[in-house]
Every structure is written in structure tokens, then in C-alpha cells.
Image (tube, grey):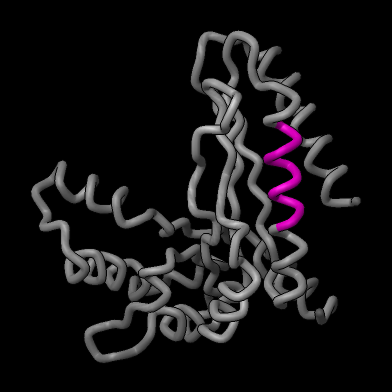
Amino acid sequence: MNAQALIDTAKALVAGYKGLLAMDESTPTCNARFARVGIPQTEAARRAYRELLVTTPGLGECISGAILYDETICQQTTNGTPFGKVLTEAGIMPGIKVDTGAKDMAGHPGEKITEGLDGLRGRLQEYCHMGARFAKWRGVITIADGIPSRGCIEANAHALARYAALCQEAGLVPVVEPEVLMDGAHTLERCGEVTEEVLRTVFTQLYD
């Protein structure tokens, strides 16, 4: 692990007034969006859509990094240039979503656990060779009657910490995303309490 390289990448991602472009929707999600507006749900259509995004003139003036999906980082423009190279040449760091989605958590009705740790070390190495500079993992926390449970919070926080450590080992900056969903009938105060508990737990796991 090159700590200084990780620090430099992290600083570049948050420099100035730029932001991250999340174009990491999965194939099913992208297809569902295409279906609603009558676009063919094909690899060719998804590639053309993503090419439109990565080749936007002046994109690098506003975007510091772009989060890609597994299919996306393997795709190329019509002239054969990998999307990752197009982004890099525009001054944008390619990133990659590495979790495999939030699934129902066994024994915890209404709660989710994000999966994708199995085989992650090898996948991260491959993405690094493909030009990725950072990665993203999202943990989902739902607020409702009796939830989130302590078990759900700790499980997601632990997964985020394991993911982050593997990223650093591979030379990628980990974007750690514990998302407390706003949906529901709970109060703003309740959302604040849960968010504080989640963040404290995540930072403790990251430190440990």
C-alpha cells in the first residue's frame, strides 16, 4: 500500500468545487430506466448511453471522479478507446462500484446487508489494472418500527470496514457510503439519532 498515493487521490477527488459522477447503475436498473422511455434494453444501448456521458465536452471542469459499474469499466467508445482512458484523459479519475447490492438480512425482517466481500481482493486488483483509482461500497440502513437493529448496523459497518481495508491494500481509495434512508414516517430527530449511531459505529469499525 502506497499511503501517499492514496492521500493524493483522495485530495484530488474532493478538490475545488468538483464532484463525483455516479454512473454505476447496475444492468437491471439501467434496463428498467430504458424500458420506461422505450429504449432497447441491450448492451449496445447501454454502451452508447455511457459513451454520451464520458465524452461530454468540458466534463472534467466539474467532475473529479466517475463511479463506474463492472460492465461500464470494460466498455469502449465507438473508436475503441476504453471508457477509463477517456475519463483519465479528461482529467477525471475512474472509480468502480464493487458491492453486489443490498440483500435481505437473515433473521432481520425489513433490514438489508450489502454483499460482495467474497472474492473482492481479486476483483480490486483487476479493477486497479484497468485504471480504477477509487472504489465505492454502499450500506443501506432503513428506519421503521423497531429498526434499525444494532445487529444490522454493526454488520454493515463491519462490511464497510473490511471493504475499505481491501481497497487500500490494492491501492484504491475507498469511498465508504453508509446511507440512512430518509423514507418513512419517522421524525427528523429520529433520523438524526440513527445517523449519528450509524456513523459512530462505522468510524469505530474503520479505526479498529
Quadrant position of residue 140 = top right
Q: 69 or 109, which lies in front?
A: 109
Residue 182, percent from left and from top: 54, 24
Decide if residue 193 is on the left or right side of residue 187.
Answer: right
Q: Residue at x 50, y 15 (%)?
A: 184
Decide if residue 49 is on the left or right side of residue 89.
Answer: left
Q: Is residue 155 magenta?
A: yes
Quadrant position of residue 95 = bottom right
Q: Residue at x 49, y 47 (%)?
A: 101
Q: Is residue 169 magenta?
A: no
Q: Can residue 6 be seen by looking at this rendering?
A: yes
Q: Residue at x 65, y 66 (%)?
A: 13
Q: Residue furthest front?
A: 107
Residue 185, percent from left and from top: 52, 9
Decide if residue 7 is on the left or right side of residue 20.
Answer: right
Q: In the picture shown, does residue 175 fall above or below 106?
A: below
Q: What secondary structure do most residues of the magenta stretch adopt? A: helix
Residue 106, percent from left and from top: 57, 31
Q: Residue at x 37, y 72 (%)?
A: 54
Looking at the rendered image, the quarter that the N terminus falls into is bottom right
Residue 153, percent from left and from top: 71, 32
Q: In the picture shown, does residue 25 fall above or below 152?
A: below
Q: Can residue 62 be seen by looking at this rendering?
A: no
- Figure disc tally: 0
Decide if residue 137 is on the left or right side of residue 163.
Answer: left
Q: 203 or 192, which lies in front?
A: 203
Magenta stretch bounds? 153-162
